[in-house]
Image (spheres, grey):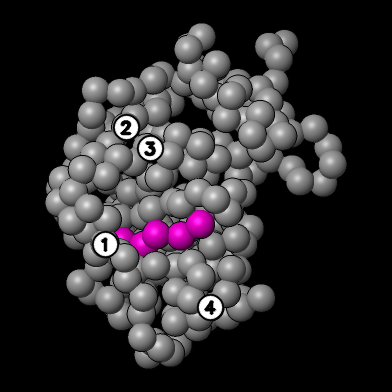
């Protein structure tokens, strides 16, 4: 486990990937916001936010998945227990949430944080698999990696609960409110609807989980 602060200099040559124009991604987001809305909220504490959020609000960020499964797993299953107790997702977790399909508008260069890409930055899978209590530290790593790779617009990494799927985080200057290189396609599903429940149940089954019954 590499639970430590990032060094000043990158330990090795970074590994990059390029995702092509037209690539489809998926995002679970608040229904009252557009799927391309970025967030620049400072997240100095572990009590809220995601793995690679900005600590100080110096950049805007947006998360997406490479598939429906990736988007749902990263957003909705990350806090479900893995200790043998039932993995039940409260229906309240779906309230006011939407699944939207996004399209990449141009070729995007990303830092690869999986496989040899983790060793290149001096890390192991702790960076992408650790619990939320370590997020203040992973956010320090995100800031360091962005500093080492100013030409990259984000990171790609394996989902915490599904090694077969990839998650993405994109960055922009803090004043950017809408992601300039992603657009919404016609596909979107409100999750707290009968259709949304069917979709979520199907994905949760893949991860030995299910929706909790209404009380």
Q: Which residue is mark 3?
A: 27
Q: Which residue is mark 2?
A: 101
Q: Secondary structure at mark 2?
A: strand
Q: Residue at x 84, y 41 (%)?
A: 84
> Residue 186: x, y in percent?
24, 23
Q: Secondary structure at mark 1?
A: strand
Residue 172 visible within the image: no
Closest to the observer: 60 or 213?
213
Q: CA distance from mark 1 to mark 2?
A: 19 Å
Q: CA distance from mark 3 to mark 2?
A: 7 Å
Q: Is residue 99 left or right of residue 60?
A: right
- Of pointers 3 and 4, the one earlier in the residue sequence: 3
Q: Which residue is mark 4?
A: 123
Q: Which residue is mark 1?
A: 18
Q: CA distance from mark 1 to mark 3?
A: 19 Å
Mark 3, mark 2: which one is toward the viewer?
2
Closest to the observer: 161 or 52?
161
């Amino acid at each position: 486990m590499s639970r430590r602060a990032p060094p000043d200099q990158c330990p090795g040559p970074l590994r990059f990937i390029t995702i092509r124009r037209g690539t489809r991604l998926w995002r679970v987001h608040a229904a009252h916001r557009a799927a391309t809305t970025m967030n620049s909220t400072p997240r100095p504490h572990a009590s809220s936010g995601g793995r690679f959020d900005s600590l100080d609000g110096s950049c805007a960020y947006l998360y997406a998945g490479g598939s429906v499964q990736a988007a749902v797993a990263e957003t909705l299953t990350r806090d479900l227990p893995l200790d043998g107790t039932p993995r039940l997702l409260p229906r309240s977790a779906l309230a006011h949430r939407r699944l939207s399909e996004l399209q990449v508008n141009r070729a995007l260069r990303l830092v690869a944080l999986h496989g040899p890409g983790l060793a290149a930055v001096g890390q192991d899978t702790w960076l992408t698999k650790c619990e939320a209590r370590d997020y203040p530290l992973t956010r320090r790593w995100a800031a360091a990696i962005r500093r080492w790779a100013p030409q990259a617009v984000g990171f790609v990494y394996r989902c915490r609960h599904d090694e077969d799927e990839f998650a993405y985080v994109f960055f922009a200057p803090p004043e950017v409110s809408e992601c300039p290189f992603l657009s919404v396609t016609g596909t979107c599903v409100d999750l707290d609807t009968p259709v949304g429940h069917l979709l979520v149940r199907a994905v949760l089954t893949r991860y030995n989980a299910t929706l909790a019954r209404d009380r």
